[in-house]
């Protein structure tokens, strides 16, 4: 019981320490502006969290080397949540209350962003979400929360429509993960199945963390599916493709953007050749992708350069949009101004995806999608026309 | 001068607290916690809330592991069933939150009966194994029972309103957690000093002897398990409300391990130890951060690459070090200090 | 028929990996009386070390194999000496919790030392596909099944005929008497940890060859757990066989009931086993009912 007191007083002391200088808006001093972020930096999901944070860092380093936002250098505060929802909530509270962030980027996976929404809404901090765009985040539109990207459903619909047009009258197979990500993939798929009356012969559901897909892929083969939507994320898709190779079948395969990272192709080997993917960011093999890597090189460390993947691009774009909005607010940016300037975002070019726009009541940038195809020889994804 | 902790009457042995100042300190602590929301920022307050919720859950586990000496490696299974029990009743069927809390206790209690009845007949690590299996199976059950649980979509949970009092704000919610934590603390302390509690401890200390004294081992072990699951379920409901969203994802297996770590670090079988352990383990990442920031301001850069994992490693290290050097946990440490203080310069 | 055959073969392949890890569990349980919850993590670490050897030193199969075995022995001995030996004589609960703490540390070390990306272990062998009729198997999968069978035979012979094997059995059955007979318990424990680490490491390397390396690999430990319960916690050979049975059960459940069942089939089996035959199929009947 006694320790309660000491803790309380300890926390109390730390609360006093973080008071900071009293300015019109939190997170701004004459020389500095704080941007906060919460990402999974530990465990397997670090793959996306670290990559996204690198994207934020690139945009921030770029702005800082150009003199900062109207003379103020950006300070980037990054919290780790380890993909644990409770810690995402705490991390967001810390960034807002203790680090006194002026604005937020990020944040973590879809379930985590959903859970953290009440915190963001209550605080009113300008936020640009870029990692896991799911409908819940912009429907209904929250005043201060903006989402750069495209919804999972739309992505799947786009991909399935494309594959259906290319392969009319074929038999379809689908496998999804047993979580909210898997369900959105399935929802998108089902809507096209209904609209186009596709013939689905296999529909599987695997447990998160599953590593052996032999029986699932055997079922797929047995069902005679000719077009296959692999709803795994990274390791799962690799395991599935290798299993199909072993079973000596090669359906036309589509994967989704969370798994569209280049190392995947190396691990799939020849089995990965020709698989289709959908995304709203440019492939690294294209002109825009190469230019982005060139830009990133001097701004980040050697280790960080290796951690770059598609999430770096989404993170970069979101940070660009946010920085531009704060910049337009001039010498004394406030939350209200930043939010209205974010709203005024019109065709902002980021170089890594289609121009980004928001609008009154529009909190979702609705990025243009493109279909890509894997090329095993060069280990890259190339846009298809 | 006190020369030791001598209990001279039976009444002293079963007293709720061993000396009057404890009451005073406890009252001060509770008062401090009541005013805490006004003094702390939202981040610091979230630690208080998490600590209170975790205390409830670990006090539940303490009945099983600390009092009765049985290990459960799958208590997160009861946490998640409790959260779903509450979410389904309150969010889906619009029942009264108090009914929800009752459900949050009863559902895991029923689950524990099913798991416990066959496995508690065996001695040793078998309960640990079946509970481990249970915590994986229950996730599949929840995901499959779509009509009831929404499957993987999860259930959004609002902060409750009980008898016209809204617990929507962080402040009020912390008070709710405080209330539940205090109730749980009293409940477990009272169980410990009752006939049932003494039976639990007798089973832990020597089951054969306990049986000779006429204790029905199977019944009492099952009772400990069910009580433990009930309390853990309540904690699960609070945790679900705190997350504002109940899904299988929000309850990783790691929580089971964390709860055991708390008991070990705090001191097995002691309510005070459980509270101390919770405070230490919950604040450990924050303390680590503090230590790192003392070393260098440039730690930030390091943290962004691989050193984040250092925190998890430290967590494992703390468990090992406590088991190795202070198996009685923080509460043991506290007793040692107190003894040294009272008897100095003599040794006890 | 072909469907069933393919399921069984895939089941045996993954089952052999479970079996090896389960044997790792059993070796430690048999000689020290505790369940090592860091088994999956040890599997993962050795596999990652093997991968590092293959990318930095040489991708030659023998270099990687010898390097991995040496690394596994060192890992096992190190854990025994630094972490487990100081706990000698402490209650089982405490030592088991120490292995859990160890698991947390080892798990985190993956991202600390390596990274979160999946990697392929390429030793120029094991990735080719052998086809008999319409049924495909990777050479690595055949090799792991063969390895399991060879190890089963070797371990049987070891416990039956070698002096040290008999000593290990003595320590397991009664460590105080064994001590009085002049057997050094710490030495036996050290040997058990090293052996367990090597067996688990072999499983990890084979898994990495046939499937891939990823920081989620430690879950193999949990997946193999049902195998050792089924075979008998104290039955080294039984655990190996238990692995094959669990692998087949999982695949049959996945193939005929759906993927949801596949991942929990093993755990459901644990519950059934504990109800009917709590000491496992091959375990010794020393369960106390009190």
Image (cartoon, grey):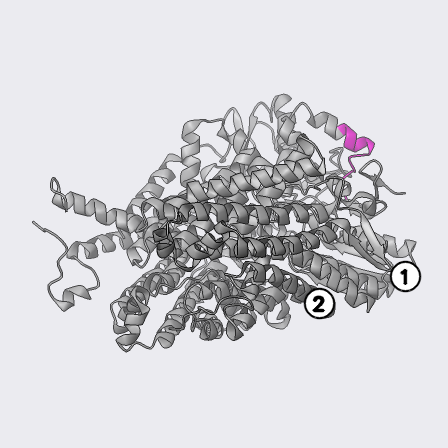
Q: CA distance from mark 1 to mark 2?
A: 28 Å
Q: Name the disc covering residue A170, or none.
A: 1
Question: In the rendered structure, which segment of residues is drawn in magenta?
Answer: A280-291
Q: Please check the rendered image and state whether residue A192 is part of the magenta-colored stretch, yes or no.
A: no
**Residue A121 versus residue B45: which sits nearer the camera?**
B45
Identify the secondary structure beneath mark 1. loop
The residue depicted at 37 percent of the width and 71 percent of the height is B221
Image mark 1: chain: A
Count every numbered label the image shows and give the total. Answer: 2
**Dot 2, how many residues are within 10 Å of its Cα: few (below 14), some (14-19), or many (20+)?**
many
Q: Name the disc covering residue C62, or none.
A: none
- Mark 1 vs mark 2, foreground winner is 2
Asked whether residue A21 is in view, the answer is no
The answer to whether tags 1 and 2 share a subunit is no
The percent coordinates of residue A202 (x first, y second) are 79, 65
The percent coordinates of residue C175 (x first, y second) are 38, 55
The percent coordinates of residue A5 (x first, y second) are 28, 48
The residue depicted at 63 percent of the width and 50 percent of the height is C203
**Residue C270 versus residue A254: which sits nearer the camera?**
C270
Asked whether residue B179 is in view, the answer is yes
Quadrant of the rendered structure where residue A248 is? bottom right
The residue depicted at 74 percent of the width and 26 percent of the height is A294
Image mark 2: chain: C
Q: In the rendered image, which quarter contains the C terminus of chain A?
A: top right
Residue at which label 2 appears? C252
Q: Please check the rendered image and state whether residue A288 is part of the magenta-colored stretch, yes or no.
A: yes
């Amino acid at each position: 019981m006694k320790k309660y007191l000491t803790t309380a007083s300890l926390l109390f002391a730390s609360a006093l320490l973080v008071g900071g200088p009293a300015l019109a808006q939190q997170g701004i001093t004459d020389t500095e502006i704080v941007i906060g972020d919460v990402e999974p930096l530990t465990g397997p999901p670090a793959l996306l969290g670290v990559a996204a944070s690198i994207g934020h860092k690139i945009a921030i380093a770029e702005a800082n080397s150009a003199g900062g936002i109207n003379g103020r250098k950006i300070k980037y505060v990054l919290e780790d949540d380890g993909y644990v929802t409770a810690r995402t909530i705490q991390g967001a509270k810390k960034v807002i209350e203790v680090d006194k962030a002026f604005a937020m980027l990020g944040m973590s996976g879809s379930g985590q962003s959903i859970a953290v929404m009440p915190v963001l809404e209550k605080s009113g901090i300008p936020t640009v979400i870029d990692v896991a765009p799911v409908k819940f985040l912009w429907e209904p539109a929250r005043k201060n929360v903006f989402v750069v990207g495209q919804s999972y459903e739309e992505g799947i619909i786009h991909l399935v429509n494309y594959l259906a047009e290319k392969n009319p009258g074929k038999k379809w197979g689908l496998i999804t993960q047993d979580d909210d990500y898997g369900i959105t993939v399935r929802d998108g798929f089902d809507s096209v199945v209904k609209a186009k009356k596709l013939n689905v012969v296999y529909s599987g559901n695997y447990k998160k963390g599953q590593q052996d897909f032999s029986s699932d892929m055997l079922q797929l083969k047995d069902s005679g599916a000719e077009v296959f939507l692999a709803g795994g994320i990274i390791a799962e898709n690799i395991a599935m493709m290798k299993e199909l190779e072993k079973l000596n079948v090669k359906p036309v395969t589509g994967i989704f953007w969370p798994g569209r990272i280049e190392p995947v192709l190396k691990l799939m080997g020849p089995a990965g050749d020709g698989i289709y993917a959908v995304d709203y960011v440019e492939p690294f093999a294209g002109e825009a992708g190469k230019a982005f890597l060139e830009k990133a090189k001097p701004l980040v460390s050697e280790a960080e350069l290796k951690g770059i993947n598609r999430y770096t691009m989404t993170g970069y774009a979101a940070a660009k949009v946010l920085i531009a909005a704060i910049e337009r607010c001039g010498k004394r940016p406030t939350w209200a101004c930043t939010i209205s300037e974010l709203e005024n975002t019109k065709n902002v070019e980021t170089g890594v995806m289609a121009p980004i726009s928001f609008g009154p009541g529009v909190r979702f940038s609705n990025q243009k999608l493109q279909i890509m195809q894997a090329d095993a020889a060069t280990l890259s994804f190339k846009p298809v026309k | 001068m006190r020369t030791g902790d001598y209990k001279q009457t039976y009444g002293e042995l079963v007293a709720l607290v061993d000396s009057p100042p404890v009451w005073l300190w406890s009252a001060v602590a509770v008062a401090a916690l009541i005013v805490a929301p006004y003094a702390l920022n939202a981040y610091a307050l979230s630690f208080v809330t998490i600590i209170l919720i975790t205390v409830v859950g670990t006090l539940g586990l303490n009945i099983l592991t600390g009092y009765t000496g049985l290990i459960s490696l799958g208590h997160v299974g009861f946490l998640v069933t409790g959260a779903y029990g509450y979410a389904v009743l309150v969010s889906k069927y619009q029942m009264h939150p108090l009914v929800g809390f009752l459900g949050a206790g009863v559902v895991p209690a029923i689950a524990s009966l099913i798991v416990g009845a066959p496995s508690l007949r065996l001695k040793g690590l078998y309960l640990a194994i079946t509970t481990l299996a249970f915590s994986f199976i229950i996730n599949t059950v929840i995901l499959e029972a779509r009509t009831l649980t929404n499957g993987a979509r999860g259930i959004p949970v609002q902060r409750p309103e009980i008898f016209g009092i809204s617990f929507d704000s962080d402040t009020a919610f912390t008070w709710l957690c405080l209330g539940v934590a205090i109730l749980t603390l009293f409940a477990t302390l009272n169980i410990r000093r009752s006939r049932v509690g003494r039976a639990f401890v007798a089973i832990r200390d020597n089951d054969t002897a306990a049986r000779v004294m006429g204790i029905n081992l199977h019944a009492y072990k099952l009772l400990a398990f069910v009580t433990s699951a009930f309390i853990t379920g309540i904690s699960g409901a609070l945790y679900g409300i705190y997350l504002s969203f109940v899904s299988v994802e929000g309850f990783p297996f790691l929580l089971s391990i964390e709860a055991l770590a708390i008991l070990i670090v705090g001191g097995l079988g002691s309510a005070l130890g459980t509270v101390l352990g919770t405070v230490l383990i919950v604040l450990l990442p924050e303390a680590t951060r503090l230590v790192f920031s003392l070393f260098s301001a440039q730690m930030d850069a390091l943290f962004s690459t691989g050193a984040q994992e250092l925190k998890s490693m430290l967590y494992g290290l703390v468990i090992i070090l406590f088991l190795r050097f202070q198996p009685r946990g923080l509460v043991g440490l506290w007793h040692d200090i107190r003894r040294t203080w009272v008897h100095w310069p003599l040794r006890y | 028929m072909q469907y069933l055959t393919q399921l069984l073969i895939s089941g045996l392949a993954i089952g052999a990996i479970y079996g090896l890890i389960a044997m790792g569990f059993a070796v430690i349980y048999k000689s020290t009386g505790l369940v090592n919850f860091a088994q999956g993590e040890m599997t993962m670490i050795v596999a990652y070390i093997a991968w590092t050897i293959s990318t930095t030193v040489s991708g030659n199969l023998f270099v990687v194999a010898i390097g991995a075995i040496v690394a596994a022995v060192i890992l096992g001995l190190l854990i025994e000496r630094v972490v487990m030996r100081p706990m000698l004589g402490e209650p089982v609960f405490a030592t088991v919790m120490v292995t859990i703490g160890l698991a947390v540390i080892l798990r985190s070390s993956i991202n600390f030392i390596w990274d979160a990306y999946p990697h392929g272990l390429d030793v120029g062998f094991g990735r080719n596909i052998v086809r008999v009729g319409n049924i495909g198997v990777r050479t690595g999968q055949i090799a792991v099944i063969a390895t399991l069978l060879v190890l089963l035979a070797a371990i049987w012979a070891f416990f039956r005929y070698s002096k040290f094997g008999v000593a290990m059995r003595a320590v397991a059955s009664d460590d105080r008497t064994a001590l009085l007979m002049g057997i050094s318990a710490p030495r036996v424990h050290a040997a058990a940890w090293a052996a367990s680490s090597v067996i688990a490491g072999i499983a990890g390397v084979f898994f990495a060859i046939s499937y891939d390396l990823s920081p989620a690999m430690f879950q193999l430990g949990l997946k193999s757990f049902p195998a050792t319960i089924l075979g008998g916690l104290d039955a080294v050979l039984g655990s190996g066989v238990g692995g094959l049975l669990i692998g087949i059960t999982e695949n049959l459940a996945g193939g005929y009931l759906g993927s949801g069942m596949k991942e929990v089939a093993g755990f459901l089996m644990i519950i059934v086993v504990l109800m009917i035959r709590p000491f496992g199929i091959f375990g010794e009947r020393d369960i106390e009912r009190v």
